[in-house]
Image: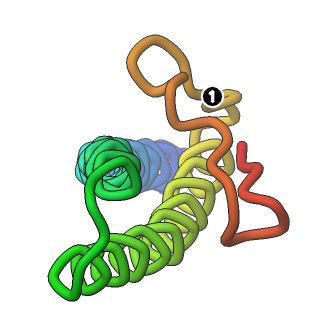
Amino acid sequence: MRRDEEDKEDLNDTTRRNNTSQADAVETLEIERTRALTSLRHLVRSNEELEVELAREDGEAAGEDADGDKAAYASAIEENKRAIANVQERIYALSREISQITGADVRLGGDDANAQVVDGGNEGGAWV
């Protein structure tokens, strides 16, 4: 009878350690997801600002400098779009991993809603 009690206690200890380990893993994943969401917001904002500058350059007098600025802005926008797609994929992967561990459905909302769809990049830019 004593052996059964020890086995149950060992099982309870193992279960507690696994639960703690899972909680730590989820916390780490959520921190990474928050960082990725912050990065995404910065990239989206950067593209919005670049698009404003590009539109302003289109409205100003043409010249060598203006053409160079337009090309630089357009290039930066395209580079940001690729980076946005990569960050979106990372957020999606982190969200799925959190869901697999917790069994909860991790979705975007609130401030994250502005980043749901971005032109270009990953299959038209759609994500989560």
Q: Is residue 7 left or right of residue 58?
A: right
Relative image position of residue 62 (x, y in whole percent) = 31, 70
Identity of the residue furthest to the left in this view? 65
Colouring chosen for the image of the structure? rainbow
80 or 19, nearer to the observer: 80
The residue located at (33%, 76%) in the rendering is: 76
Packing grade of label 1 (10 A; few <14, some 14-19, many >=20) is: few
| Disc 1 element | loop
Relative image position of residue 75 (x, y in whole percent) = 40, 82
Location of the C terminus by quadrant is top right
Tell me if I can see residue 9 in this picture. no
The residue located at (81%, 60%) in the rendering is: 124
46 or 12, nearer to the observer: 46
Relative image position of residue 97 (x, y in whole percent) = 59, 57
Location of the N terminus by quadrant is top right
122 or 56, nearer to the observer: 56
Q: Residue at label 1?
A: 107
The residue located at (63%, 28%) in the rendering is: 107
Q: Is residue 4 left or right of residue 112?
A: right
Relative image position of residue 93 (x, y in whole percent) = 60, 63
105 or 101, nearer to the observer: 105
Relative to 115, say whether 24 is above or below.
below
Tell me if I can see residue 12 in this picture. yes
Q: Quadrant of residue 43?
A: bottom left
Q: Is residue 69 left or right of residue 128?
A: left
Relative to 63, say whether 84 is above or below.
above
Identity of the residue furthest to the top in this view? 110
Q: Amino acid at mark 1?
A: Arg
